[in-house]
Amino acid sequence: MAEPTRVFLVDDHAVVRRGLASYLDGEDDIDVVGQADGGRSALSKLAVLANSGELPDVILMDLLMPDLDGITATAEIKARWPGVAVLAVTSFLEEAKVRDALQAGASGYLLKDAEADDVAAAIRATAAGHVHLAPAAAATLVTAIRAPKAARPELTPREREVIVLLAQGRTNQQIATRLGITERTARTHVSNILAKLGLTSRTQAAMWAAREGLVPPP
């Protein structure tokens, strides 16, 4: 049996954290390993987990917090521990917030009015390497990272194949299987694509592919 997905909750409202923790603890494949009431507290607690080799797989990050906002905290987390996925969580759908969260390295965007089952599904999808976008945010995300087409970097034919599969929500292993390459090679292609396009997450790459017409908008 696979190990449970390790989840860390960051929200300045205790009732929200308690509610999420209570629900997620009832899921056999999800384990809540920590909570924080703000960005600074989250960074401190994550550092402790990192020292003991117990970092979470996914962090649910509230964007609006008083001490250190979720966008700044997300950027710091991705800089320190790039292997940890962050799901941005907010009550409001604002283009600037969506754009900033993705540019900070968030792997997806979740609205606080989502059903509990949807939250669990988003966590599972993110842990598996998929891009998770709240339905209400999808159209906004397509335009949130827009850029002039004239400035589009040229991708190789193989990189175009990879980014299309990535935008379809395929994991590195699934991309490798589909293209008949190793998972390591697929991972290298994804890293090269992000570097070439000046992006920081698979979510941004998926939105870039949609904007460029390589895949239908989500």
Image (cartoon, grey):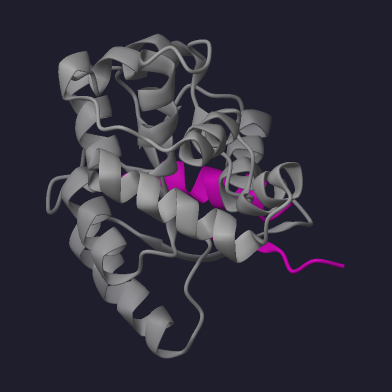
Q: Which residues are magenta?
A: 1-26
Q: Which residue is drawn at the image coordinates 43% and 17% (left, top)?
A: 210
In screen coordinates, is 178 left or right of 74? right
- The percent position of residue 26, horizontal first and vertical second, equals 74, 52
| Residue plotted at (34% across, 24% down) | 91
Q: How many marks?
A: 0
Residue 136 location (% of width, % of height): 45, 12
Q: Nearer the viewer, residue 1 or 181?
A: 181
**Rendering quarter of residue 149:** top left
For the point 48% across and 32% down, the residue is: 160
Residue 101 appears in the rendering: yes
Q: Residue 107: tell me if it is visible.
A: no
* In the displayed structure image, the side of residue 80 where residue 213 appears, left or right: right
Rendered image quadrant of residue 156: top left
155 falls in the magenta region: no
Between residues 61 and 147, which one lies in front from this camera angle? 147
Q: Residue at x 28, y 45 (%)?
A: 196
Determine whether 144 is above or below 44 in the image.
above
The quarter of the rendered structure image containing the N terminus is bottom right
Q: Position of residue 169 (x, y in %)?
A: 60, 34
- Is 4 above or below relative to 123? below
Task: State the residue lying farthest toward the right.
Answer: 1
Q: Quadrant of residue 173?
A: bottom right
Residue at the extreme left of the image, as rendered:
67
Question: Considering depth in this image, is 167 or 27 the residue closer to the camera?
Answer: 167
Give the residue furthest to the front.
Answer: 157
**Eyeballing the image, is 52 above or below 26?**
below
- Indicate the position of residue 79 as horizontal and vertical percent values: 24, 64
User: Magenta stretch containing residue 23, yes or no?
Assistant: yes
Left or right position of 83 against 126? left
